[in-house]
Amino acid sequence: MATPTVAANAYASLARMMERGGAEKASLGGQAAAGPSFSALLKDSVGSVLEAGKKSDAQTMAMASGKANVMDVVTAVADTDVAVSTLVSVRDRVIQAYEDIMKMPI
């Protein structure tokens, strides 16, 4: 399980990634596409992980002040852990796919 400092740094990194994603989208201009772009799907996924982390933090703070149930906190932290683990797994698969493509002969 991650320490609170590591989790806070991870959430801050996700927030910075989300802000940069919006700036890059604005600089690309309005491209017409048939469906959602990969970057939009990725941004939504990272945003959902960030929201899960914020919910977990809010539940933890509420429990510290005596306003939340321990079970709610455990559930929120577990949901965040699953979301972050899934995001890391997807990242690892994307990196592996990129490396496989780079090894292909031309």
Image: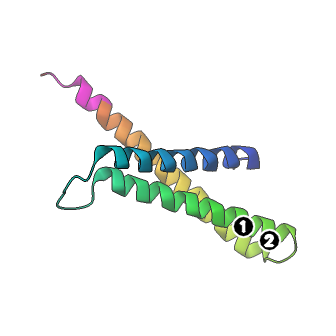
In the drawing, does residue 48 fall left or right of residue 33?
Answer: right
Quadrant housing the C terminus: top left
- Quarter-of-image position of residue 9: top right
In the drawing, does residue 25 fall left or right of residue 37?
Answer: right
- Where residue 2 sits: x, y (%)? 69, 47
Magenta residues span 99-105
Label 1 SS: helix
Specify whether residue 26 is painted magenta.
Answer: no
- Where residue 43 sits: x, y (%)? 42, 54
Label 2 SS: helix
Report the amino acid beneath label 2: Ala
Specify whether residue 100 is painted magenta.
Answer: yes
Q: Disc 2 designates what residue?
A: 62
Q: Disc 1 designates what residue?
A: 58
Q: Relative to 39, does residue 103 appear above or below in the rendering?
A: above
For the residue pair 54 and 33, the one nearer the viewer reads as 33
Q: CA distance from mark 1 to mark 2?
A: 6 Å
